[in-house]
Amino acid sequence: MTAAKIAITLPSEQLALVKLAVRDGRADSVSGYIARAVARQAREESLGALLADLTRQHGTPSRKARAWARRVLAKRAG
């Protein structure tokens, strides 16, 4: 993947949190942290679009289906 250099403006508090993440080793760099945040946002938007499409096609999941999904997902997380 190629990279492009840009300039962004962040609130001071957010920049401080990003720099702290870098200092604590939770991010390789400010750019790396922001790239991960953008990737996460893109995944969330993609999943949101998928859920909206599935809902349009099949309707809203029933209470029983949602309960089943919560149980299955809880088992995978544990």
Image: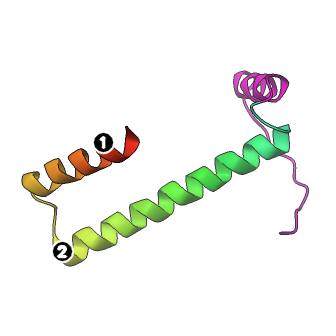
Q: Viewed as shown, does residue 15 lie left or right of 48? A: right
Q: Residue drawn at (66%, 46%), measured in percent from left and top?
A: 37
- The quarter in which the C terminus is drawn is top left
Which residue, as the protein is rendered here, is positioned at the far right? 5
Front of the two marks 1 and 2: 1
Residue type pointed to by label 1? Ala
In the rendered image, the vertical position of residue 25 relative to residue 32, given as above or below: above
Q: Position of residue 24 (x, y in %)?
A: 79, 22
Give the camera-side residue of 37 and 67.
67
**Which residue is depicted at the point 83% across and 45% down?**
31
Height in image: 77 above or below 39?
above
Within-10-Å neighbours for mark 1: few <14, some 14–19, many 20+: few
Secondary structure beneath disc 1?
helix
Q: Relative to 46, is 27 above or below?
A: above
Quarter of the image containing the N terminus?
bottom right
Q: Nearer the viewer, residue 68 or 27?
A: 68
List the residue tagged with mark 1: 74
Reading the chain from its start, which is encountered first: label 1 or label 2? 2
The residue pinned by badge 2 equals 58
Q: Which residues are magenta?
A: 1-25
When asked about the image quadrant of residue 52, the answer is bottom left
Is residue 64 within the magenta segment? no
What amino acid is at disc 2? His
